[in-house]
Amino acid sequence: MAGKINELIGKEAIEKKGWWRAYKWLILRRLSQLAIIGLFLITPICKWLNPEADCALGWIIKGNLASSKVLNTIPLTDPLLLLQMIASGFMGVAKEAIIGAMIVLVFYWLVGGRVFCSWVCPVNIITDAAFWLRTKLKLRGGTHFSRRIRYWFLGILLILSAITGSLAYELINPVSMLHRGLFFGMSLGWLVIAAVFLFDLFVTKRGWCTHICPMGVFYSLIGNYSPLKVRADARNLCDDCGECYVVCPESHILKPVLKGEEKGVPPVVSTGECTNCGRCIDVCAEEVFHFGLRSNKHTS
């Protein structure tokens, strides 16, 4: 039955809503991820084409996903990087880094926390590709990991930073490695990215993002309090096709929302584990889901 569902994912949505609306949020996410990579690549490409060029467009954003500046003025800092710096006892934490982390925190709080995972993180493209191939190859089973592992992993990394006086996670962070690799060459970074891909393909479904990545769990903590959420106000129209469960990277969060009306569960995915990827909205032919505010039915 699961195999049949996988083969038909989105087909009914295409028939009822049209191709664009059946893939809208997926396409917009990919455009967002590629556009962000492109903004960071402007300066390196410009310098490569003409070392003497002014590369004015490169001033839009300089740096990487860990630390950057917009228009050479607004600092942006990965909050997890800042936490590692503080834990490691790095006394030279600049005021600019703290301001940059606060800007990032407020932004992701507003748009849903783990929006970073689905709309920004370049590794998401790798893990989604692994999930797609896993589905095509009809791979089943795999090792089961508790979702709590990622919380332990986050805590252990901060403890390691404190013990070693280093930015422990940055030594293996596939997000940083992939981002830097696009500018300077992947080198050993390819091994880390390949390991993430193979882990998701053969070991466990959506293993890295769902079970391990400390950046994901950090942003999920923020997402617990975010105002922008996926809502299921039309859950009475749900026909139990199961397609949303297949495409959702955190499928366990859907049942309470879809089936919790009798228990008084509101029709909103309130947990921060949701990535606001919008795939449930895409594939639902009955249009059960939409983006809205946590507190009401306002759509976006």
Image (cartoon, helix red, strand yellow):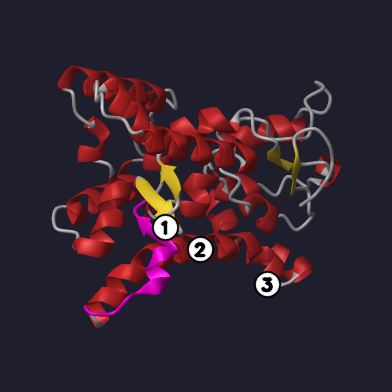
- Label 3 or label 1, whichever lies nearer to me, is 1
Mark 3 residue type: Trp
Q: If you read the primary sequence from the N terminus, does the residue marked by circle 2 or circle 1 appear first?
A: 2
Q: Nearer the viewer, residue 139 or 164?
A: 164
Residue under the image location 43 percent in, 45 percent down: 76
Distance in Å between CA atoms under marks 2 and 1: 8 Å
Q: Which residues are magenta?
A: 51-65
**Residue occupied by mark 3:** 19
- Residue reaching furthest bottom? 50
Question: Alpha carbon of mark 3 to alpha carbon of mark 2: how far?
Answer: 16 Å
Name the N-terminal-most of marks 3 and 2.
Answer: 3
Q: Quadrant of residue 160?
A: top left
Query: In this rendering, would 179 be left or right of 61?
Result: left
At 77% from the left edge and 27% from the top edge, which residue is drawn?
260
- Of 272 and 72, nearer the camera is 72
Q: Position of residue 247 (x, y in %)?
A: 56, 50
Residue 149 at x, y = what percent? 38, 25
Residue drawn at 24 percent across, 59 percent down: 181
The numbered mark at residue 125 is 1
Q: How many other residues sit within 10 Å of disc 3, few (<14), some (14-19) or many (≥20)?
A: some
Contact (CB < 8 A) between labels 2 and 1? Answer: yes
Residue 65 vertical position relative to residue 98 in the rendered view, above or below = below
- The reply to whether dot 3 and dot 2 touch (C-beta < 8 Å) is no
Does 166 sit left or right of 12 as displayed? left
Q: What amino acid does circle 2 point to? A: Arg
Label 3 and label 1: CA atoms lie apart by 21 Å
